[in-house]
Image (cartoon, rainbow, N blue to C red):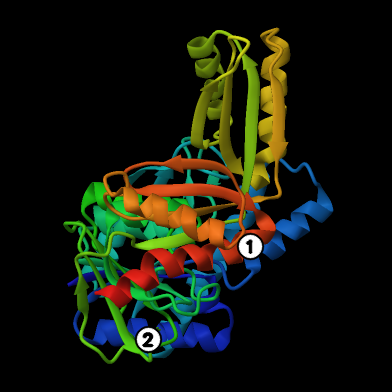
Amino acid sequence: MLIVKKFGGTSVADKERMLHVAGICAEEYKKGNDVVVVLSAMGKQTDVLLTQAEEINPNAPKREIDMLLTTGEQISVALMAMALESMGVPAISFHAFQAGIYTSKVYGNARIQRIDTARMEEAISERKVVIVAGFQGINEAGDYTTLGRGGSDTTAVALAAVLKADVCEIYTDVDGVYTADPRMVPSAVKLKEISYEEMLELASLGAGVLHNRSVEMAKRFGVELVVKSSFENLEGTRVCDNTGKKTALFQLEDGAIRATQSLEATTMEEMLVSGVTADKNTARIQLTGIKETTKEIYHIFQKLSEQHIGADSVLMSPSRDSTTDISFTVPRDRLSETVEVLNRYSKESFSPIEIIAEDNIAKVSAVGAGMMSNTSIAVNMFEALHEAGIDTHMIYASELRITVLVDEKDTLKAVRAVHERLIEKRMKQL
């Protein structure tokens, strides 16, 4: 078997954890399997490098930022190769150029375009553990690029796809995908399996377990993903192409739900909601006074796209003065850039669009297959929010999710209320 294993920054944060991860990889290798390892930078190294850049030049060129950030992963892979060699396991480390990972030219948020696997395949054939720097690539100019936050997940899935790996294991500081963040909702339950579609929605809406682009790529190329813990030898969550049936590990104990590893998986075919997420990195933009609706909307989103700013939860509504209003969300850390782009467009096009921005909000979402066809989900979700005394500022629904915007201060209360109503209450009924 060929297995790709990806470890995040907390998994290799120091010497002890680095050696622990090396032990996991060595054990897999000694079973006779071929192993490819993808690593992130150690601990908070990326944040440290960004802080150093900010101190030197707050407006540093994006090319130089990427040049700086790629050093973090290069340190990780070299140390991991040394650790494995010390255990008697032959290993070789590669950065992006050596691994042949070619990307688009966009600095800071590049996309993988192709991978030249020749050197990696040669090392695998020589029975070496191949260790690849995640999060990075090189563009057509030969410059380093980075794939955006969480990009090491995407590196791992891309390698699993081109190398035709049997499985891609993503090791994190949690032991799988839960129905909510266990730190926010102690009664959250670990799922044994989840579909690509549902996982993609959860990842896009702030779940934080997997990079959303990695899930998208896994679905496209049929890569089986398993989310596991770096610190405990527990069964993880399998992300795959299933029929929408959700499976969880749980038990009922005095009427309360407790996650457990000791019970056999219980199939929950009637569970309609896979998870509840919260995303505080959210800002809302409202545009009023749009006259030539189709033309204006096209140009507005074209300008945002040119700056690689993704809009989510887009809603359009007519105004009384024959104009149109549009509301959408963007990542909060890109709010100022978004407003700047919109102001520039308004001036250049002589279109007097009013721009209203809010950044003290959070996005709370319920995700599951068939949300639109099961109206009781929306009713119960809104009832739970009402009973918790939480006001909503915007509602967006699709076949896979219902999203509401709430005041940031109400985030925890909203997540717990929705999870209790849509998941915990339902599980008690099964």
Which mark, residue 255? 2
Q: Secondary structure at mark 1?
A: helix
The image shows residue 157, relative to residue 80, as above or below, that is above
Q: Position of residue 19 (x, y in %)?
A: 48, 87
How crowded is the residue under tag 2: few (<14 C-alpha within 10 Å), some, or many (20+)?
few
Q: Earlier in the sequence, mark 2 or mark 1?
A: 1
Task: Name the quadrant containing residue 264.
Answer: bottom left
User: In the visual, does 78 lie left or right of 192?
Assistant: right
**Can residue 158 be spotted in the picture?**
no
Q: Quadrant of the C terminus?
A: bottom left
Q: Nearer the viewer, residue 321 or 302?
A: 321
User: In the visual, does 390 lie left or right of 344?
Assistant: left
Q: Quadrant of the N terminus?
A: bottom left
Task: Name the quadrant containing residue 341.
Answer: top right
What residue is shown at x 67% (from left), y 56% (from top)? 408
Q: Secondary structure at mark 2?
A: loop
